[in-house]
Image (spheres, grey):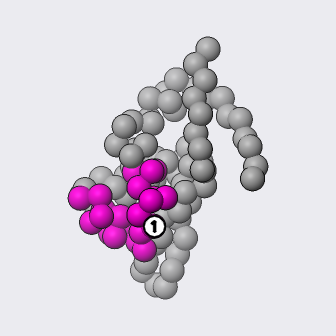
Amino acid sequence: VVEETRDLKPREVSLLTPKRLELLYSLVSLRPESINDLAHKTRRDVKNVYEDLKTLRALGFVSFKKRGERNIVPETLVEEITLLIR
């Protein structure tokens, strides 16, 4: 287990919308086999799920693993997020 502290800028914190945090939780609990599978399991549009995952990847919370020729599997890089507001 590695603990990491990051100072997020207000703009970055604003990107952590309830839908994106819910998607992050879903990655752990649903263990999707692809982005399409995650969209199906969360009953959301594939394009919206993909855009949210790209944002979470840019923030360092998600990675993409390629499986096969076309299958991209999203994986969470975090187990816990604690926000400290100062």
Queried whether the magenta region covers residue 40, the answer comes back as yes
User: Secondary structure beneath disc 1?
Assistant: loop
Q: 26 or 36: nearer the eye?
A: 26
Query: Is residue 47 shown to the viewer in this render?
Result: no
User: Residue 43 location, x and y as percent?
Assistant: 23, 58
User: Residue 66 location, x and y as percent?
Assistant: 52, 75
Q: Residue at x 51, y 80 (%)?
A: 67
Vertical placement of residue 51 versus 36, above or below? above
Disc 1 target residue: 31
Q: Specify whether 27 is left or right of 40.
A: right
- Residue at the right extreme? 2
Which of the 4 image quarters holds residue 37? bottom left
Q: Residue at x 49, y 58 (%)?
A: 28
Instruction: Kindly identify the amino acid type of the residue bearing the numbered disc 1.
Output: Arg
Which of the 4 image quarters holds residue 31? bottom left
Queried whether the magenta region covers residue 15, the answer comes back as no
Q: Residues within 10 Å of mark 1 (few under 14, many from 20)?
A: some
Q: Residue at x 37, y 58 (%)?
A: 50
Query: Is residue 75 shown to the viewer in this render?
Result: yes
Report the label total: 1
- Residue at the bottom extreme? 68
- Residue at the top extreme? 86
- Residue at the front extreme? 29
Query: What is the span of residues highlighted in magenta in the rendered image?
Result: 23-43
Q: Specify whether 46 is left or right of 32.
A: left
User: Residue 64 location, x and y as percent?
Assistant: 53, 65
Secondary structure mostly seen in magenta is helix
Q: Residue at x 53, y 62 (%)?
A: 75
Which of the 4 image quarters holds residue 53? bottom left
Look at the image and tell me in which quarter the C terminus lies.
top right
User: Residue 61 location, x and y as percent?
Assistant: 56, 49
